[in-house]
Image: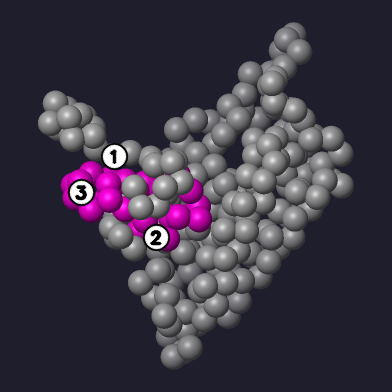
Amino acid sequence: IEKLLYKYPHNIVGIKDSSGDSDSMIKMIKTFRDFSVFSGSDSLALKAVKSGGAGAITAVSNISGKLLSFIINNWREESSISKFSELQKLQEEIRSTVFYHQPISSLKAFMSIKEDNPEWNRVLPPLVTLQDPSNNKTVISLLQFTKKMDILLSNSNFLTESGKSVFNTAKSPKLSLPITSASLIDPSKYTTTKPYPPCITWLFVIICPNSL
């Protein structure tokens, strides 16, 4: 990174760290102060921004983007927001559920149920389609988690214990920046003679603190 910044100071401005190594990510954040480090893990995003990180770029934000957005944008009020730790725990549970078994297949199966469109449940080999997603344990768990997420995010408009109202990013998408590095193709609008429609399996959503 140091060599790249020296050689291309105006071109290399940031990185997405998907290593899962929080110590390495934090060291990177502390070492390169004018360099934007985004967590590639929803679970580590809070730790990243607390250490000065730029935010997060994750695929699981397709499921829990508004939850991650609230956590990242309101972490400074953590001590005064009731159940903030429960929000973080839920975010970690959602990610671990997606990544427990075939994350891409699980995400697409979930999308097929959420959007009521079975075409979303198509993946390219060597990936394997999750059969009968409506009865799949992973998909069922994710649906339950998203219901819990919606309840938590709408609960009392996130009044703090002191009675102060916290800005709810879940209701204000302006603070969640859906800048995509790739676009998912709506399979219902795509026709082809090939056995599998070309598609991007991940949609990465960038979420940054509102201070940025």
Vertical arrangement, residue 74 with respect to residue 181, above or below: below
Which residues fall within the magenta stretch? 25-49
The reply to whether the C-beta atoms of the residues labelled 2 and 3 are less than 8 Å apart is: no
Q: What is the three-letter code of the residue carrying label 3?
A: Thr
* Residue reaching furthest to the bottom: 162
Vertical arrangement, residue 8 with respect to residue 76, above or below: above
Q: Nearer the viewer, mark 2 or mark 1?
A: 2
Q: Which residue is mark 1?
A: 14
Sequence-wise first label, 2 or 1: 1
Distance CA(mark 2)–CA(mark 3): 16 Å
Whether the magenta-drawn stretch holds residue 44 is answered as yes
Q: Position of residue 131 (x, y in %)?
A: 84, 35
Neighbour tally class for label 3: few under 14, some 14-19, many 20 plus, Cα within 10 Å: few
Element marked by disc 1: strand
Front position in the image: 40 or 69: 40
Q: Position of residue 127 (x, y in %)?
A: 70, 26
Q: How many marks?
A: 3
Q: Nearer the viewer, mark 1 or mark 3?
A: 3
Distance CA(mark 1)–CA(mark 3): 13 Å
Q: Which residue is mark 3?
A: 31
Whether the magenta-drawn stretch holds residue 160 is answered as no
Instruction: Report the residue at 50% width, 55% height from top.
Output: 43
| Residue 154 seen from this side | no
Sequence-wise first label, 2 or 3: 3
Instruction: Report the residue at 28% width, 50% height from top.
Output: 27
Q: What is the three-letter code of the residue carrying label 1?
A: Gly
Element marked by disc 3: helix
Q: Does 56 sit left or right of 96 as displayed?
A: left
Instruction: Report the residue at 71% width, 53% height from top.
Output: 142
Q: Which residue is mark 2?
A: 47
Front position in the image: 126 or 204: 126
